[in-house]
Image (cartoon, helix red, strand yellow):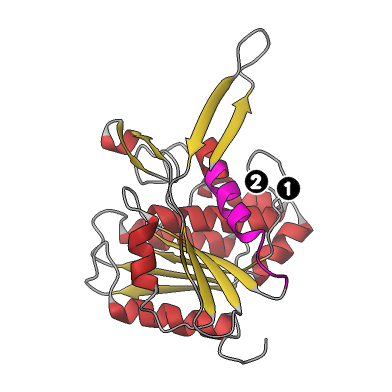
Amino acid sequence: MSYQQHLSMGSGSRPARRNFEFGRTYVVRPQGKHQATIVWLHGLGDNGSSCSQLLENLPLPNIKWICPTAPTRPVALLGGFSCTAWFDVGEISEESPDDWEGLDASAVHIANLLSTEPADVKVAIGGFSMGAATALYSATCAAFGRYGNGNAYPINLRAVVGLSGWLPGSRSLRSKVEGSHEAARRAASLPIFLCHGTSDDVVSYSYGEKSAHCLNTAGFRNLTFKSYEGLGHYTVPKEMEEVRNWLTARLGLEGSRS
């Protein structure tokens, strides 16, 4: 699937156009009653296949997992080397400029994947590393009710999970939420579960912690941040077990009502 966006470069100039070709999407079907659908986003250079293999072994029989693959694009962090990436990034820090066009393209793609789910099925987004960053960007779009480009965000997100990730657009988040009563209401009601290892050498623990603090102070108060002593930039069974328990409770799975 491709996503095209035209940017006006000012009067008298020709518009720039970036075309994002998303890769293959993998789906893990629910083994029990279909109660929730979660789009799970891989990290930089990975693909949806590896995510689907991890998630199909997670004992959550009421969840349908959708695991898309990001576009292959040059990434500034890698010196322009091309690999799968949800957006371009120069460095993983709050000083790095945000690739709003790339973020919006991925958020639109994710929303499109969720848009055809049945009305009685709860929908959520999760991810690892850059995938977690993209999930958190989608969370902010859901709170604002629009993408960064101003177009309406169409999905009623019920939960967001981010493992070893960070928050894009953190510098302007608080003012955007505080400027809208509806945004503040949606932010306060959206459950978010963040996990980060203290020995992460790719996305520093301090940056993950700061991202969680930024979300919380901006009004995303239904947020849990879990630290894992000695964990690097990867997942471990204990972490995934806590994700399973959190999703079960927040989404009212296994026949419970919420």
| Image location of residue 180, percent across then percent down | 76, 54
The front one of 117 and 197 is 117
Q: Main secondary structure of the magenta part?
A: helix
Q: Amino acid at mark 2?
A: Tyr
| Image location of residue 194, percent across then percent down | 44, 69
Residue 29 in the image: above or below residue 203: below
Please indicate whether residue 66 sits to the left or right of residue 139 in the image. Answer: left
Q: Are marks 1 and 2 in contact (CB under 8 Å)?
A: yes
The front one of 165 and 212 is 165
Residue sitting at x 43%, y 46%: 23
The span picked out in magenta is 105-119
Indicate which disc residue 196 carries: none
Check disc 2 and report the residue beneath it.
147
Is any part of residue 166 visible from this angle?
no
Query: SS for tag 2?
Result: loop
Check disc 1 and report the residue beneath it.
152
